[in-house]
Amino acid sequence: MPTERTRPPHDIGGIVCGLLFIGLGVWVITETAGMSRLGAVFPRSIAGALIVFSTIMVVVRLIRPRGHETPDPGSTPRRLGFIGVMTAWVLLLNVVGFFTTSLLCFLGLMLVAHHGRWTPGLAAALVLAGVVIVTAFQVLFTEALNVPLPTGLVF
Amino acid sequence: MDRLQYLFDALTPLNIALAWAGVIAGTVIGALPGLSATMAVAVLVPITFSMDPASGLIMLGAIYTGAIYGGAFAAILVNTPGTPSAIATTFDGFPMAKRGDGDLAVTLAAIASVCGGLVGALALLLLAPPLARVALAFGPVEYFWLAMLGLTLIAALSEGDLLKGLMGACFGLLLSMIGVAVVGGDVRFTLGMPQLLGGVEIVSALIGLYCIPVLIDMVSTPKAHLKVSTTPRGFRLGEALGLAWRHKVNLGRSSVIGTLVGILPGAGGSIAGLVAYSESRRTSKRSRHFGTGEPEGIMATESANNATVGGGFIPTLVLGIPGTPPDAVILGALLVQGIRTGPSLFTDQASISFTFIYGLLIATVLMLPTGLLIGRYAYKSIISLPKAVLVPTIAFMTVIGSYAIQNSAVDTVIMFTLGVVGWVLARFGFKPSPIVLGLVLGQIAEQGFVQGWLIGSATNDLVGMYFGRPLSIGIIAFIVLSLFYPLIAPRLKPRRPAPNAPETSSRKGAANAD
């Protein structure tokens, strides 16, 4: 029985990234217009190369569709939850204070990363582990390594 | 006879204890993402001020060598180079850990680090003055070509999509240009934000690009982070020693590369690891397995980056020019101790310099038991911790590590932003390694290129400047070999097909050969 050859899907994501890289290359070249020759020569060369490679990739992908290995599906809400908690962490640590932000976000990430059933005992154990780990690192960095961690509004 | 006396001086219980303490402290600090060897040495250097100069130096050397080795743990177990020197360790270390060979990878890294460290320290002991002249022979154009040699790895790291690899490398190179230009002083691509004037801090970017995508995908499934073996296998020392013996040429060559690159001021362990990895891949019969968990890749990187320790001390001690950033800190410590560096150091203050070098050799040997024990503990911790603890702990280390580099929250924001960008790009087939390669090598390449262009223009010999110098020609030959050898090698000689299965032990490797 003859097998039917299926056409691979277009690498839409790759093509969009390619177009964005072309845009980035054009922006870099326009930015170099106001720079000295010494400062402009390297970025202009690299941006030119980026535009050439991206254009070839986009054209080749349009003419000969080729998918790429798709990553594991996984849970999108958990991924977005992780990104949300981390965004709050890096933006607030200077404002609220390193210890407080880190402790809250540490506990937040525990919520995002735990896939099993929650029990009061497990929750208590995880909170305790979080407090111990954050405190230990805080002490290690501020006392032993002399890194001045921001204290912010709270601590 | 004098040298034997210096060896005995280095072998006092106090010096051995200091070397061991230094190795432990360095390994632990190096294993934490964001805490580099430079920071390990800088933080602990005041402790040595009150010590006898030779003992203080032994401790600093031990901290340095331990920190370079410690970077391998995070690279292998969480895909994040603990130090920039361990960038290339992630290429094969993490895939090995994912398939359940993390214990073997950690042990191999320890053995390779000891081999590299010994070769570097022996070069320092026996060949320091003549090798120091190599550092002076390297001009800007040679640095440019060296960076290009590192960039040839893109072909290997693109995982079947060279165009995307090249685009990723260009993106990384553009990222390296953000801030004040290395030559000319132009303010570039800062979007008007003064926070970006200092540019993208490389270690923060490394942490973000490698670690954040792993964490994002880790939280999305309940699957274990690393594959866990059902049977306890210990250190797998015999298996690792067997692999090391079989690839002794790779170990030796990578150690020599590491020593030579370490001698070059400013090059450092990351370039040494990348160049050694590239050479190892080029010459290996299993080159197509590189990047998928090939033990040879780990051995090449780890031996090379630890060899830079001894190599870096050569220009530091002989010429007073620090070969690597930690060497610069140690040079400062030498001045505080009243030691004058220069060729006369090995004659006028031979007792200090030779006792220190023997101490460095001892510290390197001590790295094996220390590394095996710490590595075993780290591996067991990583595989036994539940995700609810592992994910926030690693995330916390990325935040605190990227902050601590320059005490800057901006670096933390850049780390996370690049991490998310890297994750999005990876979903569309753009791997992080070419981006990292461009970012790490960008400044060296640009500085060498522009300075060479300036000198060539001034002397009216632009072509001769780039292509006429003997050292440049040698490096260009290696670049050409790296790029085209895999294409022409099969035509030069008929060869048995390489084994498909991952190489773990001799018996398994042979059994699985095609």
Image (cartoon, grey):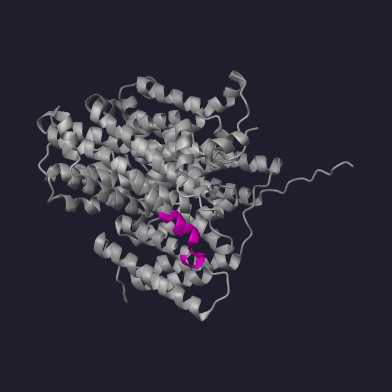
Q: Residue B481: where, in percent of width, then height?
A: 49, 25
Farthest-out residue, right: A1
Give the main secondary structure of the magenta stretch: helix
> Could you tell whether A117 is left or right of A11 in the image?
left
Residue B458 in the image: above or below residue B358:
above
Quarter placement of the N terminus of chain B = top left
Relative depth, front residue between B84 and B448: B84
Quadrant in the rendering for residue B301 = top left
Q: Is residue B47 visible?
A: yes
Relative depth, front residue between B123 and B323: B123
Q: Residue A113: where, in percent of width, then height?
A: 52, 67
- Give the residue drawn at x 25%, y 25%: B133
Magenta residues span B377-389
- Give the residue drawn at x 57%, y 69%: A115
Q: Is residue A34 visible?
A: no
Residue B51 magenta-highlighted:
no
Relative depth, front residue between B62 and B242: B242
In this figure, what is the number of numbered marks?
0
Quadrant in the rendering for residue B254 = top left
Quarter placement of the C terminus of chain B = top right
Q: Residue B49: where, in percent of width, then height?
A: 14, 50
Residue B28 in the image: above or below residue B326:
below
> Could you tell whether B30 is left or right of A108 in the image?
left
Residue B387 magenta-highlighted:
yes
> Could you tell whether B317 is left or right of B349 in the image?
right
Q: Residue B62: where, in percent of width, then height?
A: 26, 45
